[in-house]
Image (cartoon, grey):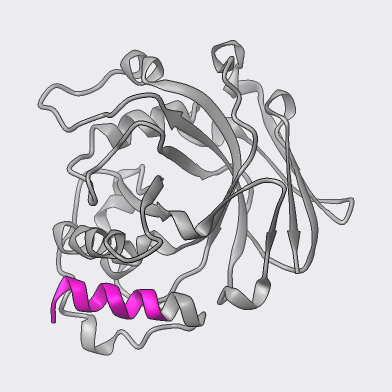
Amino acid sequence: MSAAELARELARARTEARVLNVAPWRDAVRSMDDAYAVQTELAKLPGNSVRGWKVTALTPEQQRGFNGTRPVAGALFADHVQRAPATLTLSKLIASVIECEISFRLARDLPQRSTPYTDAEIADAIDAIVPCYEFPDNRVPADAPDLLKLADDMGNGAFVAGEPVTNWRNVDLSQIEIVLRLDGAEIARGPAARILGNPLKAVTALANAQPLPAGGLKAGQIVTTGTCTTPLPLQRGEYVADFAVLGRVKLSVV
């Protein structure tokens, strides 16, 4: 079975908010290249232009699940990306969780190259920090191989971007703690430093973990670096995430 066929099945499962029977596909994705081939095919479908990337597998232990030694990424597709204040409909998701993350908007392309990118080079390629929510929502079962999860956009269900902060070089990310509230009550908090001590390092790690699917890292795309708060089941109500000097991100779930 081809990457294009699996991509169509995953896209259909996403539209119908259901878990895909992966039994016929378990042998179709045996490597990171196979998984990325599926993401590339997903990016060709209507509404699936790539708006950004979610990074994961930043540690060697996590990378072993993908039969690799580098971080991996799932595409953030246009039809599933919103600007805050936003509204999500719970019935359009399967069993999503809410995560508060620090993301970065690229000012220029970051192509694959033989010499590793440095943190300073990556910082020069970024024009804004974007506080955000990411909503994992797998179309494959929890016990499916990690490579199938990678093929399924690394489980992205939705993404909500806050207001970009362009004077970000004055921001000390190591000192930012994010507080998440639901209907006014605090439900989670966590530091931005949870991501490698500084989330910017996750962008560097991804830039040095290419090739990526669907053309890779492009100007204008957002790279989100992983959750700073404990993932919690998404439920109906009014969410506000306070990212300190980066501002607040508001979300209604109906």
On the image, the x and y values in percent for residue 166 come to 57, 19
Residue depicted at x 44% and y 83%: 19
- Res. 221 image quadrant: top left
Residue depicted at x 35% and y 48%: 57
Q: Is 193 above or below relative to 136?
A: above
Quarter of the rendering occupied by the C terminus:
bottom right
Quarter of the rendering occupied by the N terminus:
bottom left
Marks counted in the figure total 0
Residue depicted at x 57% and y 33%: 130
Foreground residue, 48 or 88? 48
Q: Residue furthest left?
A: 114
- In the shown orientation, is residue 85 left or right of residue 19? right
On the image, the x and y values in percent for residue 211 come to 17, 43
On the image, the x and y values in percent for residue 40 come to 23, 58
- Res. 222 image quadrant: top left
- In the shown orientation, is residue 51 left or right of residue 134? left
Q: Is 54 above or below relative to 16?
A: above
Q: Which residues are magenta?
A: 1-12
Foreground residue, 195 or 118? 118
Foreground residue, 152 or 51? 51
On the image, the x and y values in percent for residue 66 come to 25, 58
Q: Main secondary structure of the magenta part?
A: helix
Q: Residue furthest front?
A: 46
Foreground residue, 167 or 99? 167
> Is residue 175 on the magenta stretch?
no
Residue depicted at x 22% and y 88%: 24
Q: Is 180 above or below relative to 3?
A: above
- In the shown orientation, is residue 40 left or right of residue 75? left
